[in-house]
Structures are given as structure tokens and as C-alpha cells.
Image: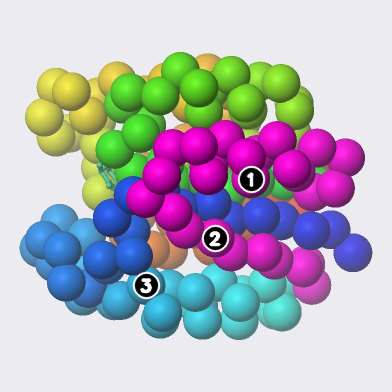
Amino acid sequence: MKTIRVINGPNLNMLGIREPDIYGKTDYKALVELIEKHAKEIGVNVEIMQSNHEGDLVDWIQESYKKIDGIVINPGAYTHTSVAILDAAKAVGIPMVEVHISDVDAREEFRQVSFIRAACKKTISGHGINGYLEAMDFLNQNC
Ligand code: DQA
């Protein structure tokens, strides 16, 4: 059975509270439950993590080496700033899908830059929390 890791960056723990008009009303706990339910349905193991700290995301990507089949990553604001997360993704070479709840390419100019994209097989942006499930389906078929 494949193991997929879902890595969430800063402020995603605030889902349901933060800017609900942009990120929706579902809270982080409900997102985790939805992902776990979907993993059961498609028959994959899933590990879900969230941190507000850049180094945690780097560590979790590094730890995935030779252990994890695919990574779904929403680096939050680190999408637009972090060369360190990009370098970690390139170092492990694990199939990765970038997910954004909002349509980052239709928002402020600074959100239209993604460092992680260069290491990802696919980007899913603006599909709400359903984007996580689509990313899991893609990895299940492509990793
Ligand atoms: C986000 C978009 C980012 O620009 C923002 O900083 C986030 C969430 C999204 O899921 O739409 O924290 O990655």
C-alpha cells in the first residue's frame, strides 16, 4: 500500500477562522478527517502534518526519503518565499503535488510566485479543500 504524506505550512491550522471568504469555513480538524476518510476510500496510508515553522517542513520532506511514496504540500506563505523547502523537495526527489485552497495565481502579485512549483509534478490551486483529495488521487495514480 502506498503512503502519502500531506504537509501543511503556516496558518493552515487556522482554517475555518482565518479569512473564511478566501479559505472557507471548514476547520483544520475537519480537513484532517476528510483526508483520512479519502485515504481509506482510495486505499492508501496517509500521514498528515502541519507546522508554522519552515524548518519543520524541511525536516518532514527530508525524513520522507525512501519512506514515503508521494507528498501533497501546501506550504502556505512559504510557497512564495522558501528556497529551503524547494531544495529539500529537489533533494529527496519524491513525487509531489502543490495544493492551494485559494487561487493563488488570481490574487496579489506576491502570491503568484511559487518556489515549490519547480519540484512538483502538478499544482492544484483554487479548488478549495477538495484540492487535497484531487492531489491524493493524482499521486495514487502517478507515484
Ligand atoms: C495558501 C495561499 C498562500 O498564499 C497563503 O499564504 C496561505 C494559504 C492557500 O492554500 O490558498 O497560507 O497556500
Asked which quadrant contains residue 54, the reply is: top left
Q: Is residue 83 left or right of residue 72?
A: left
Magenta-drawn stretch contains 44: yes
Q: Is residue 99 left or right of residue 101?
A: right
- Alpha-carbon distance for marks 3 and 1? 19 Å
Q: Quadrant of the N terminus?
A: bottom right
Of marks 3 and 1, the one in the foreground = 1
Q: Is residue 137 visible?
A: no
Circle 3 is placed at which residue position?
28
* Three-letter amino acid code at the position of disc 1: Trp
Nearer the N terminus, badge 3 or badge 1? Answer: 3
In the image, residue 28 sits, relative to residue 89, either above or below, namely: below
**Which region of the structure is painted magenta?**
43-68
Instruction: Determine contact: label 1, label 2, CB under 8 Å.
Output: yes
Nearer the N terminus, badge 1 or badge 2? Answer: 2
Quadrant location, ligand no. 1: top left
**Residue 60 has which mark?**
1
Nearer the N terminus, badge 3 or badge 2? Answer: 3
In the image, residue 67 sits, relative to residue 136, either above or below, namely: above
* Three-letter amino acid code at the position of disc 2: Met
- Alpha-carbon distance for marks 1 and 2? 9 Å
Circle 2 is placed at which residue position?
49
